[in-house]
Image (cartoon, rainbow, N blue to C red):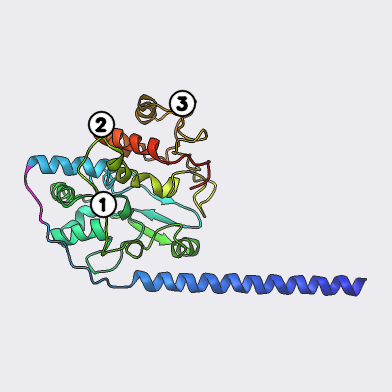
Amino acid sequence: MGRLIKRLALAIAGLVVVAAAGVGIFAYTQTSAYDASVNKVYDVPPLALTRSTDPAVIARGQHLAKALAGCALRDCHGGDLSGGRFLDSGPIGTLSAPNITNILPAYSDGELARLIRHGIKKDGRTVQFMPVPDFNWLPDSDVVAIISWARTVPASDKPNASSLTIKTLGKVLDRRGQFPADIARHIDHDHIEIGPAPAATKEYGRFVAHLCTGCHGEHLGGGRIPGTPSSIPTPLNLTPDPSGLAGWTYDDFVHVIDTATRKNGKQLDPFMPIEALRSMDDTERHALFSYLQSIPPRPFGSR
Protein backbone atom coordinates (compact mmCIF):
# COMPACT_ATOMS: atom_id res chain seq x y z
CA MET A 1 0.00 0.00 0.00
CA GLY A 2 2.86 2.35 0.86
CA ARG A 3 4.43 1.82 -2.56
CA LEU A 4 1.09 2.45 -4.26
CA ILE A 5 0.62 5.70 -2.38
CA LYS A 6 4.15 6.72 -3.26
CA ARG A 7 3.55 5.95 -6.94
CA LEU A 8 0.31 7.92 -6.89
CA ALA A 9 2.07 10.83 -5.24
CA LEU A 10 4.81 10.74 -7.86
CA ALA A 11 2.23 10.56 -10.64
CA ILE A 12 0.31 13.53 -9.23
CA ALA A 13 3.56 15.46 -8.81
CA GLY A 14 4.40 14.68 -12.43
CA LEU A 15 1.04 15.96 -13.59
CA VAL A 16 1.51 19.15 -11.58
CA VAL A 17 4.92 19.68 -13.18
CA VAL A 18 3.52 19.04 -16.66
CA ALA A 19 0.58 21.37 -16.00
CA ALA A 20 2.90 24.07 -14.64
CA ALA A 21 5.13 23.70 -17.66
CA GLY A 22 2.10 23.92 -19.93
CA VAL A 23 0.94 27.10 -18.20
CA GLY A 24 4.43 28.53 -18.45
CA ILE A 25 4.67 27.75 -22.16
CA PHE A 26 1.21 29.20 -22.78
CA ALA A 27 2.07 32.38 -20.88
CA TYR A 28 5.36 32.70 -22.76
CA THR A 29 3.75 32.32 -26.17
CA GLN A 30 1.02 34.79 -25.29
CA THR A 31 3.37 37.43 -23.89
CA SER A 32 5.73 36.99 -26.84
CA ALA A 33 2.83 37.48 -29.25
CA TYR A 34 1.77 40.58 -27.32
CA ASP A 35 5.26 42.07 -27.35
CA ALA A 36 5.60 41.45 -31.09
CA SER A 37 2.18 42.95 -31.78
CA VAL A 38 2.77 46.22 -29.92
CA ASN A 39 5.87 46.74 -32.06
CA LYS A 40 3.96 46.33 -35.31
CA VAL A 41 3.89 49.40 -37.55
CA TYR A 42 0.43 49.87 -39.04
CA ASP A 43 -0.12 51.01 -42.60
CA VAL A 44 -2.88 53.45 -41.71
CA PRO A 45 -2.30 57.03 -42.88
CA PRO A 46 -3.15 60.11 -40.81
CA LEU A 47 -6.70 61.34 -41.36
CA ALA A 48 -7.32 64.33 -43.60
CA LEU A 49 -8.75 66.43 -40.78
CA THR A 50 -7.62 69.80 -39.44
CA ARG A 51 -8.42 71.84 -36.37
CA SER A 52 -11.02 74.57 -36.25
CA THR A 53 -10.86 77.92 -34.47
CA ASP A 54 -14.65 78.24 -34.31
CA PRO A 55 -15.59 78.82 -30.62
CA ALA A 56 -18.63 76.56 -30.97
CA VAL A 57 -16.47 73.72 -32.28
CA ILE A 58 -13.96 74.22 -29.48
CA ALA A 59 -16.76 74.20 -26.88
CA ARG A 60 -18.10 70.97 -28.38
CA GLY A 61 -14.63 69.46 -28.11
CA GLN A 62 -14.31 70.40 -24.46
CA HIS A 63 -17.67 68.78 -23.74
CA LEU A 64 -16.70 65.59 -25.57
CA ALA A 65 -13.33 65.43 -23.80
CA LYS A 66 -15.16 65.32 -20.48
CA ALA A 67 -18.23 63.26 -21.39
CA LEU A 68 -17.85 60.76 -24.22
CA ALA A 69 -14.10 60.66 -24.90
CA GLY A 70 -13.12 61.02 -21.25
CA CYS A 71 -9.59 62.26 -21.92
CA ALA A 72 -10.05 65.28 -19.62
CA LEU A 73 -11.06 63.21 -16.59
CA ARG A 74 -8.91 62.63 -13.49
CA ASP A 75 -8.50 58.93 -14.32
CA CYS A 76 -7.16 59.84 -17.74
CA HIS A 77 -5.13 62.95 -18.64
CA GLY A 78 -6.90 65.31 -16.24
CA GLY A 79 -8.89 68.47 -16.81
CA ASP A 80 -5.82 70.40 -17.99
CA LEU A 81 -4.38 67.36 -19.84
CA SER A 82 -1.30 67.43 -17.59
CA GLY A 83 -1.65 63.82 -16.45
CA GLY A 84 -4.02 61.67 -14.44
CA ARG A 85 -3.82 59.73 -11.21
CA PHE A 86 -1.93 56.46 -10.80
CA LEU A 87 -4.07 53.36 -11.42
CA ASP A 88 -2.95 50.03 -10.01
CA SER A 89 -4.71 47.04 -11.59
CA GLY A 90 -2.72 44.48 -9.63
CA PRO A 91 -1.51 41.51 -11.70
CA ILE A 92 -2.82 43.11 -14.90
CA GLY A 93 -0.62 46.18 -14.80
CA THR A 94 -0.24 49.78 -13.71
CA LEU A 95 -0.97 53.04 -15.48
CA SER A 96 -0.62 56.76 -15.08
CA ALA A 97 -1.70 58.77 -18.11
CA PRO A 98 0.93 61.27 -19.31
CA ASN A 99 1.02 65.03 -19.50
CA ILE A 100 0.01 65.33 -23.13
CA THR A 101 0.24 69.11 -23.34
CA ASN A 102 3.93 68.57 -24.11
CA ILE A 103 3.21 65.73 -26.55
CA LEU A 104 0.48 67.32 -28.66
CA PRO A 105 2.77 69.76 -30.50
CA ALA A 106 4.68 66.82 -32.00
CA TYR A 107 1.51 65.48 -33.61
CA SER A 108 -0.13 66.88 -36.71
CA ASP A 109 -3.91 67.24 -36.65
CA GLY A 110 -4.19 64.22 -38.93
CA GLU A 111 -2.01 62.12 -36.62
CA LEU A 112 -4.12 63.09 -33.61
CA ALA A 113 -7.24 62.14 -35.55
CA ARG A 114 -5.68 58.77 -36.40
CA LEU A 115 -4.88 58.23 -32.72
CA ILE A 116 -8.49 58.94 -31.74
CA ARG A 117 -10.03 56.85 -34.51
CA HIS A 118 -7.51 53.99 -34.89
CA GLY A 119 -5.44 53.92 -31.68
CA ILE A 120 -2.21 54.42 -33.61
CA LYS A 121 0.56 56.71 -32.36
CA LYS A 122 2.74 59.07 -34.34
CA ASP A 123 5.32 56.31 -34.92
CA GLY A 124 2.68 54.02 -36.46
CA ARG A 125 2.54 51.66 -33.49
CA THR A 126 -0.39 50.95 -31.21
CA VAL A 127 -1.22 53.02 -28.20
CA GLN A 128 -1.56 50.79 -25.14
CA PHE A 129 -4.46 50.79 -22.67
CA MET A 130 -6.10 53.95 -24.08
CA PRO A 131 -9.82 53.06 -24.42
CA VAL A 132 -10.06 54.09 -28.08
CA PRO A 133 -13.02 51.77 -28.91
CA ASP A 134 -15.08 53.69 -26.36
CA PHE A 135 -15.11 56.78 -28.57
CA ASN A 136 -13.64 56.06 -32.02
CA TRP A 137 -17.19 55.89 -33.35
CA LEU A 138 -17.45 59.68 -33.07
CA PRO A 139 -17.98 61.33 -36.48
CA ASP A 140 -15.25 63.39 -38.12
CA SER A 141 -16.81 66.64 -36.91
CA ASP A 142 -16.51 65.50 -33.29
CA VAL A 143 -12.94 64.27 -33.81
CA VAL A 144 -12.12 67.72 -35.19
CA ALA A 145 -13.82 69.30 -32.17
CA ILE A 146 -11.71 67.32 -29.69
CA ILE A 147 -8.50 68.18 -31.52
CA SER A 148 -9.52 71.83 -31.76
CA TRP A 149 -10.15 72.07 -28.02
CA ALA A 150 -6.96 70.17 -27.11
CA ARG A 151 -4.94 72.64 -29.17
CA THR A 152 -6.25 75.47 -26.97
CA VAL A 153 -5.15 73.93 -23.65
CA PRO A 154 -2.06 75.70 -22.31
CA ALA A 155 1.12 73.67 -21.98
CA SER A 156 1.79 72.50 -18.43
CA ASP A 157 5.20 72.24 -16.79
CA LYS A 158 3.95 69.46 -14.54
CA PRO A 159 6.51 66.63 -14.52
CA ASN A 160 5.45 63.83 -16.80
CA ALA A 161 4.66 61.00 -14.41
CA SER A 162 3.54 58.65 -17.18
CA SER A 163 3.89 55.03 -16.19
CA LEU A 164 2.62 52.05 -18.12
CA THR A 165 3.33 48.45 -17.25
CA ILE A 166 1.28 45.64 -18.76
CA LYS A 167 2.13 42.53 -16.76
CA THR A 168 2.01 38.92 -17.90
CA LEU A 169 -1.62 38.41 -16.90
CA GLY A 170 -2.61 41.62 -18.68
CA LYS A 171 -0.88 40.45 -21.85
CA VAL A 172 -2.51 37.02 -21.68
CA LEU A 173 -5.96 38.53 -21.12
CA ASP A 174 -5.40 40.90 -24.03
CA ARG A 175 -4.57 38.04 -26.37
CA ARG A 176 -7.72 36.26 -25.19
CA GLY A 177 -9.83 39.33 -25.88
CA GLN A 178 -10.73 39.84 -22.21
CA PHE A 179 -8.70 42.97 -21.47
CA PRO A 180 -7.81 45.20 -24.43
CA ALA A 181 -4.37 46.69 -23.89
CA ASP A 182 -2.85 46.28 -27.37
CA ILE A 183 -5.49 48.66 -28.66
CA ALA A 184 -4.86 48.86 -32.41
CA ARG A 185 -4.94 45.05 -32.70
CA HIS A 186 -8.54 45.01 -31.51
CA ILE A 187 -9.75 47.53 -34.09
CA ASP A 188 -10.89 46.61 -37.59
CA HIS A 189 -9.22 49.55 -39.29
CA ASP A 190 -11.06 49.02 -42.55
CA HIS A 191 -14.52 48.88 -41.01
CA ILE A 192 -14.93 51.30 -38.11
CA GLU A 193 -18.62 51.92 -37.47
CA ILE A 194 -19.37 55.62 -37.10
CA GLY A 195 -22.29 56.69 -34.94
CA PRO A 196 -25.29 58.75 -36.03
CA ALA A 197 -25.90 62.40 -35.22
CA PRO A 198 -26.59 63.02 -31.53
CA ALA A 199 -30.22 62.31 -30.63
CA ALA A 200 -32.12 61.09 -27.57
CA THR A 201 -32.61 57.67 -29.13
CA LYS A 202 -31.56 54.12 -28.39
CA GLU A 203 -29.73 54.09 -31.74
CA TYR A 204 -27.40 56.85 -30.57
CA GLY A 205 -27.37 55.37 -27.08
CA ARG A 206 -25.89 52.14 -28.44
CA PHE A 207 -22.73 54.08 -29.24
CA VAL A 208 -22.74 56.08 -26.02
CA ALA A 209 -22.89 52.73 -24.17
CA HIS A 210 -19.42 51.87 -25.51
CA LEU A 211 -18.26 53.74 -22.41
CA CYS A 212 -19.85 51.04 -20.25
CA THR A 213 -18.81 47.81 -21.99
CA GLY A 214 -15.18 47.93 -20.87
CA CYS A 215 -16.22 47.34 -17.26
CA HIS A 216 -19.75 45.91 -17.43
CA GLY A 217 -19.00 43.57 -20.34
CA GLU A 218 -20.02 43.32 -23.95
CA HIS A 219 -23.58 42.37 -22.95
CA LEU A 220 -23.63 44.79 -19.97
CA GLY A 221 -24.58 42.02 -17.55
CA GLY A 222 -21.88 42.96 -15.05
CA GLY A 223 -19.74 40.62 -13.00
CA ARG A 224 -16.09 40.62 -12.00
CA ILE A 225 -13.69 41.87 -14.65
CA PRO A 226 -11.47 38.89 -15.59
CA GLY A 227 -8.10 38.88 -13.88
CA THR A 228 -8.66 41.96 -11.74
CA PRO A 229 -7.65 41.99 -8.06
CA SER A 230 -10.22 42.08 -5.27
CA SER A 231 -9.56 45.79 -4.84
CA ILE A 232 -11.32 46.44 -8.16
CA PRO A 233 -15.09 46.56 -7.57
CA THR A 234 -17.43 44.21 -9.37
CA PRO A 235 -19.46 46.04 -12.06
CA LEU A 236 -23.23 45.79 -11.71
CA ASN A 237 -25.82 44.58 -14.18
CA LEU A 238 -27.03 47.36 -16.51
CA THR A 239 -29.62 45.30 -18.39
CA PRO A 240 -33.38 45.48 -17.55
CA ASP A 241 -33.15 42.29 -15.50
CA PRO A 242 -34.41 42.13 -11.88
CA SER A 243 -30.76 41.98 -10.86
CA GLY A 244 -30.12 45.12 -12.90
CA LEU A 245 -32.23 48.06 -14.06
CA ALA A 246 -35.65 46.43 -14.30
CA GLY A 247 -38.36 48.89 -13.30
CA TRP A 248 -36.05 51.88 -13.38
CA THR A 249 -37.31 55.24 -14.60
CA TYR A 250 -35.25 57.90 -16.29
CA ASP A 251 -35.47 59.95 -13.08
CA ASP A 252 -33.99 57.00 -11.15
CA PHE A 253 -31.14 56.86 -13.65
CA VAL A 254 -30.41 60.59 -13.44
CA HIS A 255 -30.58 60.51 -9.63
CA VAL A 256 -27.81 57.90 -9.53
CA ILE A 257 -25.69 59.98 -11.90
CA ASP A 258 -26.18 63.27 -10.09
CA THR A 259 -25.80 61.94 -6.54
CA ALA A 260 -23.42 59.00 -7.10
CA THR A 261 -25.82 57.05 -4.92
CA ARG A 262 -27.65 53.83 -5.79
CA LYS A 263 -31.38 53.41 -5.25
CA ASN A 264 -30.61 51.45 -2.07
CA GLY A 265 -28.72 54.45 -0.68
CA LYS A 266 -25.25 52.97 -1.13
CA GLN A 267 -22.59 55.23 -2.61
CA LEU A 268 -21.15 54.29 -5.98
CA ASP A 269 -17.56 53.10 -5.87
CA PRO A 270 -15.03 55.79 -6.91
CA PHE A 271 -13.92 53.38 -9.64
CA MET A 272 -17.14 54.27 -11.47
CA PRO A 273 -16.50 57.07 -14.01
CA ILE A 274 -19.25 59.21 -12.55
CA GLU A 275 -17.38 62.34 -13.66
CA ALA A 276 -17.99 61.43 -17.30
CA LEU A 277 -21.65 60.61 -16.72
CA ARG A 278 -22.23 63.90 -14.93
CA SER A 279 -20.66 65.70 -17.89
CA MET A 280 -23.16 64.19 -20.33
CA ASP A 281 -25.85 66.48 -21.68
CA ASP A 282 -29.56 65.62 -21.65
CA THR A 283 -29.43 64.14 -25.14
CA GLU A 284 -26.62 61.75 -24.23
CA ARG A 285 -28.25 60.74 -20.94
CA HIS A 286 -31.63 60.07 -22.54
CA ALA A 287 -29.98 58.13 -25.36
CA LEU A 288 -27.97 55.95 -22.98
CA PHE A 289 -30.95 55.18 -20.75
CA SER A 290 -33.15 54.39 -23.77
CA TYR A 291 -30.57 51.93 -25.04
CA LEU A 292 -30.04 50.25 -21.66
CA GLN A 293 -33.79 49.72 -21.34
CA SER A 294 -34.03 48.29 -24.87
CA ILE A 295 -31.47 45.49 -24.60
CA PRO A 296 -32.43 41.93 -23.58
CA PRO A 297 -32.46 41.26 -19.83
CA ARG A 298 -29.49 39.19 -18.72
CA PRO A 299 -28.67 37.72 -15.31
CA PHE A 300 -25.95 39.32 -13.23
CA GLY A 301 -22.50 38.09 -14.23
CA SER A 302 -23.35 37.47 -17.88
CA ARG A 303 -20.90 40.17 -19.00
Q: Mark 1 highlights which residue?
A: 137
Q: Which residue is mark 3?
A: 263
- On the rendered image, what quadrant is the N terminus found in? bottom right
Residue 159 appears left or right of 144: right
- Under mark 3, the amino acid is Lys
**Residue 249: x, y in percent?**
39, 26
Residue 282's disc number: 2
Residue 246, placed above or below residue 67: above
Question: Disc 2 to disc 3, how far (Cα)?
Answer: 21 Å
Q: How packed is label 3: few (under 14 Cα within 10 Å), some, or many (20 or more)?
A: few
**Mark 1 / mark 2, whichever is N-terminal:** 1
Mark 2 crowdedness (10 Å alpha carbons): few <14, some 14-19, many ≥20: few
Image spot of residue 199 (x, y percent)? 23, 37
Marks 2/3 in contact by CB < 8 Å: the verdict is: no
**Magenta stretch prevailing secondary structure:** loop
Q: Position of residue 131 (x, y in %)?
A: 33, 53
Which is nearer the N-term, disc 2 or disc 3?
3
- Front residue (pair 3, 247): 247
Spatial separation of the CA atoms under disc 1 and disc 2: 20 Å
Q: Residue furthest left?
A: 54
Magenta segment, which residues?
50-54
Which residue is at a point 45% across and 51% down the rendered structure image?
Answer: 88
Q: What's the amino acid at mark 1?
A: Trp
Between 156 and 56, the residue placed more toward the observer is 56
Image spot of residue 262 (x, y percent):
45, 29
For the point 45% across and 27% down, the residue is 247
